[in-house]
Image: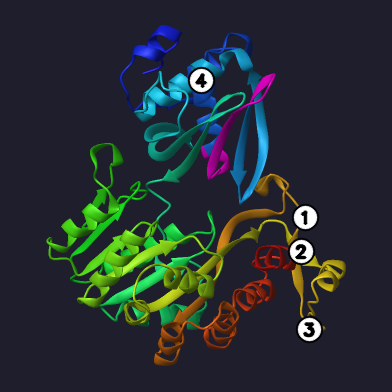
């Protein structure tokens, strides 16, 4: 359903529109409605593989930015007079309150795209996680895009090295305890979390999740989404999950002390718990846990493994050539490179939109928690001491994993340095 009038935007019920390129083709730019304009934005984001769409009101215009391969750039501007109608449309189709403009809102949007494929047209369904926020120029919206049909990767497609992959599989086979994925926002934690669930889903396990929101829908897994408006919190959901006879529990994110405490108790009564935490390092994650009002012995006993992750851009395979190491950057960060070991870069071509990069891949640190590390947690040693222990006991450091991908022509030294400094 394509709505064209402001009154329709404000009164229509949420729907799942079918977005067709032909709809916009019949509307010249000077006659384009906010609905068709948004359709164009969505279609272009899908075509370019954008992970996020930012719709931002500036003083004199409405700006659209896409995040592609981790980099954000402006792709379009529109008349600021259409701002309210664009935001109303976003709210209507994502189930948000249209008239509420002074508080942040979170919603969910599903769209069915009619995409041309050779001589036919195929329909693909996409998920968008929607977040609105008031700014001094009006409401801004950010939509995170997930291709429901194609985004879920197998664990052996994540970019883990052979040793790291074996270590992760070993941890997952433990059957009880907490496996924590850590990293900053947008570092790939959720994708890795789901790939681990997908791996476990091949076994005879009862797998349940509590998420906010559910970002991927996986067959044979009971997924539940918190709803703060009805009082359904992570804490309430986790208590209920335990009565559902689970073998494996996935918690979308540890956000507070209550969630952390319940997760650890679940791990200690024989459940495997997979979850994420926003920190920049493995040692930082443990310091954050021990800073909570939870017994250090419980923290030490509950954890079985921690994975730290970053995403680096992949060199475009269509235009990859041998290159020269970035000596000035390496000198700046005191990094040496073995003589005679090749590095590569992308020249830029139509396939990568002349950026030299296409897609992203993870670099990882994987730590199996042992008794020595548990004793360090109980003794509450400093973060620096934990850091040194982690560096000497992970399968390989983030930087070492990144350098290995540089040697294999997957990414560049510039990328690895940038995400590991």
Mark 1 and mark 4 in contact? Answer it, CB < 8 Å: no
Image quadrant assignment for residue 125 = top left
Image quadrant assignment for residue 292 = bottom left
Q: Quadrant of the C terminus?
A: bottom right
Q: For mark 2, what is the residue?
A: 321
Q: For mark 1, what is the residue?
A: 347
Residue 345 horizontal/vertical position (percent): 75, 62
Mark 2 and mark 1 in contact? Answer it, CB < 8 Å: yes
The span shown in magenta is 46-62
Q: For mark 4, what is the residue?
A: 86
Which residue is found at the position 69% from the left and 76% from the top? 407
Q: Is residue 113 above or below residue 194?
A: above
Local SS, label 1: loop
- Viewer-closest of 237 and 322: 237
Sequence-first tag of 4 and 3: 4
Residue 108 horizontal/vertical position (percent): 37, 36
Mark 3 → mark 1, Cα distance in angstroms: 23 Å
Residue 9 horizontal/vertical position (percent): 41, 14
């Amino acid at each position: 359903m394509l709505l064209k009038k402001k009154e329709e935007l404000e009164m229509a019920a949420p729907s799942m529109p079918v977005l067709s390129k032909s709809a916009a083709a019949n509307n010249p730019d000077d006659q384009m409605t906010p609905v068709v304009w948004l359709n164009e934005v969505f279609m272009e984001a899908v075509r370019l593989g954008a992970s996020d769409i930012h719709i931002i009101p500036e003083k004199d215009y409405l700006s659209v930015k896409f995040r592609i391969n981790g980099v954000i750039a402006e792709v379009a501007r529109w008349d600021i007079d259409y701002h309210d109608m664009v935001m109303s449309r976003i709210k209507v189709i994502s189930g948000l309150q249209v008239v509420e403009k002074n508080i942040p809102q979170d919603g969910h949007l599903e769209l069915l795209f009619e995409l041309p494929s050779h001589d036919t047209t195929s329909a693909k369904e996409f998920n968008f996680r929607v977040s609105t926020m008031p700014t001094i120029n009006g409401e801004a919206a950010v939509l995170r895009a997930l291709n429901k049909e194609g985004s879920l990767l197998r664990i052996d497609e994540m970019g883990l090295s052979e040793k790291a992959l074996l270590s992760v599989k070993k941890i997952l086979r433990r059957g009880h305890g907490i496996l924590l994925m850590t990293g900053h926002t947008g570092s790939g934690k959720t994708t890795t979390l789901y790939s681990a669930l997908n791996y476990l889903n091949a076994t005879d396990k009862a797998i349940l999740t509590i998420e906010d929101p559910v970002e991927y829908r996986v067959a044979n897994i009971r997924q539940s989404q918190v709803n703060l408006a009805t009082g359904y919190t992570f804490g309430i959901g986790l208590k209920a999950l335990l009565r559902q006879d689970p073998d494996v529990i996935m918690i979308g994110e540890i956000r507070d002390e209550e969630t952390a405490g319940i997760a650890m108790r679940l791990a200690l009564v024989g459940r495997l718990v997979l979850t994420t935490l926003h920190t920049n390092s493995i040692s930082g994650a443990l310091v954050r846990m021990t800073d909570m009002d939870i017994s250090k012995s419980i923290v030490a006993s509950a954890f079985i493994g921690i994975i730290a992750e970053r995403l680096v851009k992949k060199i475009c395979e269509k235009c990859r050539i041998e290159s020269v190491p970035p000596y000035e950057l390496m000198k700046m960060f005191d990094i040496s490179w073995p003589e005679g070991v090749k590095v590569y870069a992308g020249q830029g071509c139509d396939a990568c939109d002349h950026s030299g990069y296409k897609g992203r891949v993870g670099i990882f640190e994987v730590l199996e928690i042992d008794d020595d590390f548990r004793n360090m947690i109980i003794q509450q040693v400093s973060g620096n001491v934990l850091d040194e222990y982690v560096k000497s006991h992970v399968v390989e450091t983030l930087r070492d994993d990144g350098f290995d991908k540089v040697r294999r022509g997957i990414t560049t030294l510039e990328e690895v340095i940038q995400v590991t400094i």
